[in-house]
Amino acid sequence: MIPFLDLKKVNAQYRDELVSAATRVIDSGWYIQGNEVKAFEKEFAAYCGTKHCIGVANGLDALTITLRAWKELGKLKDGDEVIVPANTYIASILAITENRLKPVLVEPDENTFNLCPGKTAAAITPHTKAILAVHLYGQICPMPEIMNLAQQYELLVLEDAAQAHGASIGGRKAGSWGHAAGFSFYPGKNLGALGDAGVVTTNDSELSETIRALGNYGSHKKYENLYQGVNSRLDEIQAAMLRVKLKRLDVEISHRRNLANYYLSNIPSDLVGVPFLINQESHVWHLFTIRYEHRPELQEYLRSKGIETIIHYPKPPHLQQAYNNFNKLSFPITESIHKTILSLPLSPVLSEEECSKVIRVLCDGVAHVNDKN
Ligand SMILES: *Cc1c(COP(=O)(O)O)cnc(C)c1O
């Protein structure tokens, strides 16, 4: 059996260090807003190349609270339009609507599945105030072009970097391009905690202070409440886990890149659609997604041969019940991506031999399914 992602094995690599970090926190008697969070914020800001990093409870909160902070600072108001790719994970859209802002769904680039400058520019109206750039599957969006557009139209840019820790353009990392960025450390992400966790990165000191206050009951000073805030904080114990794993992130990314390159050079691209890679540094391969017309049959074939695959994602946000006001909209590129996409096993603990087996079975599966259709 080749699992899609063996999290137990991923964390077992660092078990001793994780245990001693957890022990350190348990024995410290300090569990919220202490030295582990402070140290991790500093280390992750340095990793991304930003001035600030603010711990929050999860990736969705990172996005939601940042937009909320811009509202509190008078940079956004109810009803303002936020451009967002139609094929993103639902969290990106939830962060927008939770703030009573209007998501303007835009088709992605057909190759990269990310926002592209042309379609983004075409969606800008006098009501557009922000762009939510999602680095989907781990490949960074064309940030120089997006930042140029933003400057030209005076828009805020929030990166959804939940899948792209460490991806970069010209050495400049995801999370340092926009006016702010949200990261998730959900256990299955490339940098994963042992529970929920997230951060915002930014170079904007005023924004940073506002986010910190909003995530702590709206309080910038003990028992003084500036805003009607929420409770969204990064736990000491998760920060301690993340400090152990951050030190290994680059090694893990390089393993992911090796496996992805192995897939790319050995999966026959006339059989299935393979991911479009801009260049090595742009992608950290959170997911390796192929496309195939008869996906259900192929997925079942792989399953029957012991290979686990997952669909990211089966249904786009505009077709969800939660957004029934968008159900009548049509996004053909997005809908076709969701119908055909399939994520193959890829992780820091997968071997090239296992990838080779996945490819063998995949080729057999495609031949088998094509025969029947
Ligand atoms: C995981 C993810 C989120 C949300 O992160 P959580 O920590 O699960 O709240 C947001 N956006 C994208 C693109 C994600 O993949």
Image (cartoon, rainbow, N blue to C red):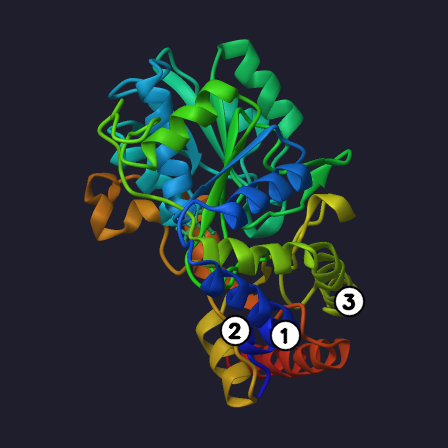
Percent x, y for residue 258? 78, 63
Residue indicated by mark 2 = 309
Mark number, residue 214: none
Compared to residue 230, the image places residue 12 above or below, namely: below
Mark number, residue 262: 3
Q: Residues within 10 Å of mark 3 (few under 14, many from 20)?
A: some
Q: Is residue 95 left or right of residue 49?
A: left
Q: Earlier in the sequence, mark 2 or mark 3?
A: 3
Q: Residue at x 27, y 22 (%)?
A: 226
Percent x, y for residue 373? 50, 77
Q: Residue at x 21, y 52 (%)?
A: 321
The residues bearing labels 1 and 2 have C-alpha atoms spaced at a distance of 30 Å
- Amino acid marked by disc 2: Thr
Q: Earlier in the sequence, mark 1 or mark 2?
A: 1
Asked whether the viewer can see residue 206, the reply is yes
Residue indicated by mark 1 = 16
Which element is circle 1 on? helix
